[in-house]
Amino acid sequence: MNQPREVLILTGMSGAGRSTVAHALEDLGWYVVDNVPAALLPALVAQTDGAAISAMAVVVDVRSGRFFDDLNNALVQLSDDGVPHRLLFLDSTDQALVQRFESTRRPHPLQGADRIVDGIARERTRLEDLRSRADVVIDTSNLNVHQLEKRVGEIFAAGETHGVRVNVLSFGYKYGIPVDADLVLDCRFIPNPHWVPELRALTGLDEQVSEHVLSSPGVGAFVDSYVSLLNQMAEGYLREGKKYVTLAVGCTGGKHRSVAISEAIATRLNVTQGPVSIEAHAIHRDVGRE
């Protein structure tokens, strides 16, 4: 039976960017089917038998009404049928979702006669277990359309990966910990370049700041040890079927230390040979936000 190489189930909070992600996947060559009742997923995949489809993405969300409750059963059926699949969950803060619905002047699908926040609360409760099962979670709260498209490209451009793909995401604690983080690394123990006048206006992407951060006592050994740890963890992640990992690296403002450390970790992960192959990308959530 010639199944698609990989099936990606795209779901998440209404207003979190499913349409943008679906279009981005299409641009990357994925075959995308929108708003499919969850109960029909196995039959839809079976219909692709013999088709020249290397990667398929299926959008399933609360618009499917009661059929959405069948998603768990459908995922079990796909596993029983031997179909490789991943679950992508798009999330966003309540505040960001409210602003998006208000800007488009559209009601939330579960709002009814109540407020937007009530619809969001109902949906979040309904999706809580599903989010915990997701292989990939993307927090779109602070991403514009182009940034979200870029993030999707970084994760899914190559289709199925035989190793582990790590997104190393720098952030500032004062803006909140990313909700899509699998691992959180605190680098606030490193001397802050903010207090060096000639470095304050620069970022961790600038060579002067990077050198200042990485040459601080113990930082080189710290980065090396964390890269070694990730290489060891990657084997277990792959064994458990988790191919996409988000490592969030934080400092106070997400401008200097976390950016430099994220770049260093991503670079070393890409050149270090561990038990399994790792492809890493550095992403900087809060650079330019101050």
Image (tube, rainbow, N blue to C red):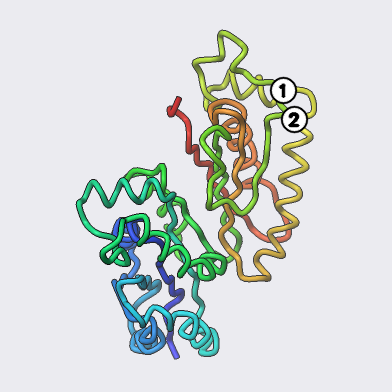
The amino acid on which the numbered mark 1 sits, given as a three-letter code, is Ser
Instruction: Give me the residue at 54% from left, 89% from top.
Output: 80
Could you tell me how many numbered marks the image carries? 2
The numbered mark at residue 225 is none
- SS at mark 1 in the image: loop
Q: Which residue occupies the foreground of this view, 254 or 154?
A: 254
| Res. 50 in view | no
Q: Which residue occupies the foreground of this view, 188 or 272?
A: 188
- SS at mark 2 in the image: helix
Residue 103 vs 160, above or below: the answer is above
Residue lying farthest to the top in this orientation: 197
The residue labelled by disc 1 is 215
Q: Neighbour class for label 1 at 10 Å: few (<14), some, many (≥20)? A: few
In the picture, the quarter occupied by the N terminus is bottom left
The residue labelled by disc 2 is 219
Instruction: Give me the residue at 37% from left, 59% from top.
Output: 118
Instruction: Give me the residue at 51% from left, 35% from top.
Output: 175
Across and down, in percent, residue 48 comes to 35, 85
Residue lying farthest to the left in this orientation: 105
Q: In whole angstroms, how far apart are the C-alphas of marks 1 and 2?
A: 7 Å
The amino acid on which the numbered mark 2 sits, given as a three-letter code, is Val
Across and down, in percent, residue 10 comes to 40, 67
Query: In which image quadrant can residue 253 be found?
Result: top right
Across and down, in percent, residue 131 comes to 51, 65
Query: In which image quadrant can residue 133 be found?
Result: bottom right
In the picture, the quarter occupied by the C terminus is top left
Q: Neighbour class for label 2 at 10 Å: few (<14), some, many (≥20)? A: some
| Res. 258 in view | yes
Residue 168 vs 38, above or below: the answer is above
Q: Which residue occupies the foreground of this view, 157 or 141?
A: 141
Instruction: Give me the residue at 25% from left, 48% from top.
Output: 102
Tag 1 and tag 2, C-beta contact below 8 Å: yes
